Image: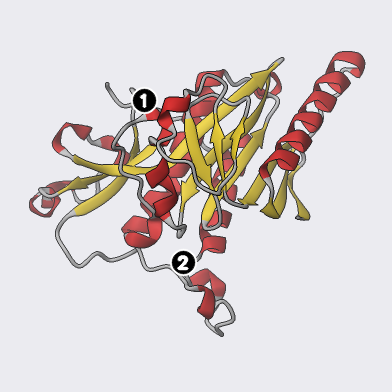
Amino acid sequence: MQNNTQQLNDTLISKSLAAADYVPTLDAMLARTLARIDLKKQQGLRTPDELWIVDHNDVYTLGQAGKEEHILQRTNTPIIKTDRGGQVTWHGHGQLVIYWLFDLNSLGWSVRNLVSHAEQAIEDVINDCLQNSSPSDPTTISAHARRDAPGVYLYADTSAADDSDDADAPVNSTSLDDKIMLGKMASLGFKIKHGFSYHGIAINLNCDLSAFNAINPCGYAGMQMLRLSDFVDMQKESEAHTTQPISDLLSYEVVTQKLIDNIAKRHAGLIELRALAPK
């Protein structure tokens, strides 16, 4: 498990963990959170918040109130009971996992603020990737959070080609009533302890989605899980050493950096929350 640390600003750092087993990562994340809580309580110190960017080895995780009935088939992949919110999900290679180790009270964020910032950061990045993919058909695909179920979902709007007057309208400004939900691309699950958050988000970029067939993803029977690489052209592993500038390619690394940049701006107060969509 490799660990690379980067300073994003005075109060935020990122750590990258490759080929990470789940239990040691969880233990380290909890230990770091408890240490930060102790430093704040005993010495009044505000320690830098942390984003952990994790490439997990295959694992199923079951949330604190998770029900075993949502595990439909036992495989060779380990099933780990964990302390985050939510039901059962899968983590593995090709999926981007980011853990948010944030001091919410110092940021002035509520738990609702945390969830909304996470969902809207994902919306921003996924929609940026989709809008720049130059689709050849008139169907417009866009990413949206839902009020009734945490996470970010893809929607199709087949009437978009006729709405030329609204071509410059923000992607997130329209109601979901006139859109068709295609499935779920990103999941969320946090734990809050003494005002500090840990756990976080998981986005399917170019992973093998068949692992989700053994579970009811996030407790929803029949929920279709999606990945970004099925909707936009992403750099393949064999193209990793291409001479084309990395900024011109949509790859796992490029999407990861886009999301880190967006989250860092939100953490610094440079991106404000949008109003929540109506139920």
Question: What SS does tag 1 mark?
Answer: loop
Residue positioned 55% across, 49% down in the render = 76
Residue type at mark 1 is Leu
Q: Which disc is residue 276 wearing?
A: 1
Position of 207 with respect to 20 (left or right) is left
Residue positioned 86% across, 19% down in the render = 38
Circle 2 is placed at which residue position? 250
Whether 230 is drawn above or below 192: the answer is below
Of 107 and 66, which appears nearest the observer? 66
Query: Residue 153, percent across and down?
Result: 34, 40
Whole-number angstrom distance, CA of label 1 to CA of label 2: 29 Å
Position of 49 with respect to 174 (left or right) is right
User: Extreme bottom residue here?
Assistant: 243
Query: Residue 247, percent across and down?
Result: 53, 69
Quarter occupied by the C terminus = top left
Quarter occupied by the N terminus = bottom right
Q: Quadrant of residue 264?
A: top right
Total numbered circles = 2
First-in-chain label (1 vs 2): 2
